[in-house]
Image (cartoon, rainbow, N blue to C red):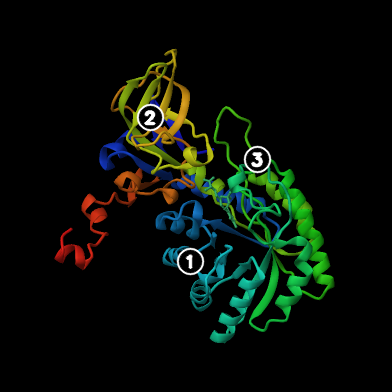
Amino acid sequence: MDHFLYRDGAMFAEDVAVSEIAATVGTPFYVYSTATLLRHFRAFDEALEGMDHLVCYAMKANSNQAVLRTLAQAGAGMDVVSQGEYLRARAAGVPGDRIVFSGVGKTAEEIRVALQGGIRQFNVESEPEMEVLNAVALALGKVAPITIRVNPDVDAKTHAKIATGKSENKFGIPISRASEVYAMAAAMDGLEVVGIDVHIGSQLTDLAPFELAYQKVAELTEQLRSEGHTIKRLDLGGGLGIPYETSNEAPPLPAEYGAMVQKTLGHLGCEIEIEPGRLIAGNAGLMVSKVIYVKSGEDRDFLILDGAMNDLIRPAMYEAHHDIVPVKEAEPGVEQQPYDIVGPVCESGDTFAKQRNMAPMAPDDLVAFRSAGAYGAVMASEYNSRALIPEVLVHGDQFAVIRRRPTFDEMINRDSIPEWLETHPA
Ligand code: LLP
């Protein structure tokens, strides 16, 4: 459930009319609901009740400072994958001991910054990374807490670009080699093994692949313990999917996921960490855009919006579906018509939806892309020299711009002209 509902024919974000935000900040923009963010975080938190646990929000999904602060105040930890994310989390007030550091390519510098600043654990993904981590820790006179990410070779049955748990993927170490790699880690003085990490993919709509992976983790826990390792913490990754199409069957809820975790791993007495991103932020956000033109093609009508693939890349990149709805609700009984919904960017891939049925639309009408709170703003670019679009956070009847639209001057002035072009004009 989210907090974007029609009231008397107008879409609201909590208690604020979306059209009022549009009038204030201009289009396109992202808008997030505090109540939805918190609801989703709490759903996970409650799903793991009875087990020692920490929900580490995967901030790659949406890393705006205001979003992070909202979740951190509710007790969330963070899953970070870069120095930038680590520093963002700290700037938002997240203590180091609530931050886990994931990612296949952590550099020595990133490791140093996190070790010095304070970190709950590194999720190590390879032997070479383990060696660098050990060396950096020893040089700083510290001991780095680690889990090792195992690749359980499980088919997550999701889009190939966001599946991570098959042996052909670059992530983790093969579970079959875990014993050997844990022994290597135990022999390194700069490392302290605290547990196991696993993450098999994103937008999973079925619990079965998770359960299969977690069963393998349960077996591995027993095996590693018998080999003398301390396994007190299990990081189970993120990946639970969200309903992008309201007409489709909904994926399992956090409560069902939590019950499965308790059933599969509860007997081990481990502290559980999970790293949900999409499920917390996805349906907590809309991208709102305006119709510029309605263009009649030879065999179809195009809705040309002021938002484009650079603002929301998921449809172009993953053929992802986002529900697109009018901000002013269609009158009941109005006949719908099919549109190709596109942006102004100069390539055909700048298509949000093909032959999507909507009530007839006109220039200046507003549309809202649902489920755009995760992997929306964070994946935006300035392609075609389009400025990054603003982000707005709603809380009850209040709203605030949490990232403003940059000016064109700011955009242009980030470039600099080398001396030689000034002194010897071509
Ligand atoms: N933990 C790790 C180690 C991850 O790699 C990811 C996502 C997550 C947690 C969070 O997964 P979530 O709960 O959000 O599914 N840009 C793509 C999604 C890429 C996900 C990458 N890793 C998209 O727009 O669908």
**Residue at 32% over, 34% down:** 19
Which of the two labelled residues, at mark 3 and mark 2, occupies the earlier sequence position?
3
- Which residue type carries mark 2? Val
Residue 411 seen from this side: yes
Near-viewer residue (26 or 35)? 26
Residue 48, position as x, y percentages in the image: 67, 54
Kindly check if marks 1 and 3 are in contact, taking CB atoms under 8 A apart as contact: no
Q: Residues within 10 Å of mark 3 (few under 14, many from 20)?
A: many
Which of the two labelled residues, at mark 2 and mark 1, occupies the earlier sequence position?
1
The quadrant in which the C terminus is found is: bottom left
Secondary structure type for disc 3: loop
Residue 70, position as x, y percentages in the image: 45, 55
Read off the residue under disc 2. 327
Residue 290, position as x, y percentages in the image: 32, 32
How far apart are labels 3 and 2 at the CA level?
28 Å
**Residue at 54% over, 47% down:** 278
How far apart are labels 2 and 1 at the CA level?
36 Å
Near-viewer residue (11 or 100)? 100
How far apart are labels 1 and 3 at the CA level?
29 Å
Question: On the rendered structure, is 205 left or right of 358?
Answer: right
Residue 71, position as x, y percentages in the image: 49, 56
Near-viewer residue (40 or 287)? 287
**Residue at 73% over, 50% down:** 154
